Image: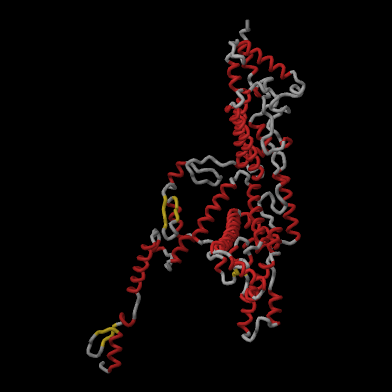
Amino acid sequence: RPSRHAPRRAAHLGQGRGGCQGATVGGEGWPIEGTDASAGPLGASSDPPSVAMSFSVLESLRSAHEDTENIEKAMSLVLMEKTKNSRNPVSVEHALHYLVEASRAKARSAVDIYSDKDGMRSDDINALAGQRGDKKQGDVWTSFYDKVKDVKDYHRRPHVNTGLPELQNARWFFERAFEADKSDSLFSGEEEMGKRVDMHSIFAAFVNLKKITANRKSKAKEACFARLKKKDPSLTPDDPDVEEAFAKEYAELDYIEWLKSFDQFHEVPRYCKYKEKLYTDYLDSIIAYLRGLLLRTQPMVGVEKLETQFDKEFDERWADKSIPGWQDATHKEKLFCLPSNKLFNNAAVIESHKTGKLYKKKVQEVQKLSFEDQKKLIEAVEEEDRRVARLESRAAKWYDLLRDTIDETVTHLQKKQSQTAEEMEAEKDLDSEEEDDDGADVDGSDMEKDDEDRPIYNPLNLPLGWDGKPIPFWLYKLHGLGIEYKCEICGNYSYWGRRAFERHFSEWRHAFGMRCLKIPNTSHFKEITKIEDAITLYDKLKKDAEEQTFRPDQDVECEDIQGNVMSQRAFEDLRRQGLV
């Protein structure tokens, strides 16, 4: 006869990882897909899933749900860590990515158990109901004691009792996520944890593109010759003075200038990129680097969705022929040779090419082709145009997406170029001191300081006082800070409260607006906020001023001998005529 304490014991043995010895379950304690077991596995079991308590399918399911909840709590802890600015943002992003992948792995294991392809879940449920595998009527208590025996047999194994069961709560997952973070090894020193880009190798590949380099030199030489010809019209392009001036002035493109403008692919001539493998490799390297940089700094971003959006926008712009530099097809260019499938840079080269035997042989081969085959040649040229244009468009999209990082790189490099050796050493020492401060232990006073630095609860969005805290609500109402005053002269800028509104008439923004209207900012225009009212008042003031101005020709009166009174202007006219 079973003991009355049997149900309590059953509940005690099924407590899972938070209880006593029924802590480790089948399938748990194994790293997620794509992670290394030594990088911080999500459990402590060293047995494969088929060995570790494989009989307890329902416990595995319950544990998967528990782990999912704990992982969600760990995500919230990671996000709170991000707001404290105590960790590198890139490390936080990688920790979040680690937890998301862990949650997906737990969800997949739960879905596999729910699908019950092997029937173990159904057998477990039937066993709880006292049904035996041979379909004979069993006893609930017999099944219960069989389970107790299995649990005891499992925990008699030597590897189980080697250590205490580990409590895998939200804090445990939080710590494992940051232990698995390897973001420090993902970036070079120049990139500084994703704050800047390091594209020196790509820049070197661009400088070594011979056609583009020759075209850049040719344009610089033409500009130099045009400038010198204005001073001396007798100069020729081959004049030694032109060569000497060009040699002094010309400077090869540097890294900073290239970073500012490497997305301007429409400025590259068509002959420099049509069927040029080195150029397409250069574009591929730009795309691969910028894409990889985004994944290293923000692993949670859906790159595939971004690329799908890029391709969709490209297809629309290609159909509208609105992509800069690709409005016309290559086969319509005057310097394109269809039999040879080549694009030349000037007329002299293509004329020389047409006199060769190879060109004549190609022409004969094209003439033997049918109309459909000749049409396929043109389609192949258009397809090559589309392929290169797609690469350029995608590279430009990645540039726009990471423009802030590239601008930060340019600013940093320009700052380094302007610094002396002493300034660079001082800045390096300052950075090392900041790193030491970041790694210091936090005591109680620092914790209190962190509490003070946290955002202040201000649901009414009240203005802050001198102490950095919101002012009392009664003071807010007393000064009328909830009343908005708009000034059209200031560009529809809003002023809150009567005091700020009256004070703004003497401030720079209102004075600048009045100066733009060519109206003096005098006391006559106080309380005037409309542009039309200010102009009307200014016209009236000018008219009144003209009426009050003393004009001698009209305001001075003169009298002739006969006693006739007239204005000075009329008197002078009559006197010149000899009538008075």
Q: Quadrant of the C terminus?
A: bottom left
Q: Compared to 30, does 154 lie above or below?
A: above
From the top left corner, tell me how far across and down residue 410 is, in percent.
65, 59
The image position of residue 319, as x and y in percent, is 50, 58
Residue 476 lies, with reference to residue 520, above or below; the image says above
Q: How many marks?
A: 0
The one of 440 and 53 positioned closer to us in this rendering: 53
From the image, which quarter does the N terminus lie in?
top right
Please tell me which residue is depicted at 66% across the width and 24% down the height of the picture.
Answer: 17
* Near-viewer residue (128 or 512): 128
Residues 240 and 329: in front is 329
Based on the displayed image, in which of its 4 quarters is residue 450 positioned? top right
Q: Is residue 169 left or right of residue 436?
A: left
| Coloring basis for residues | secondary structure
In the displayed orientation, state which residue is furthest to the front: 368
Q: Is residue 342 visible?
A: no
Residue 29 lies in quadrant: top right
Residue 216 horizontal/vertical position (percent) = 65, 70
Q: Nearer the viewer, residue 446 or 262?
A: 262
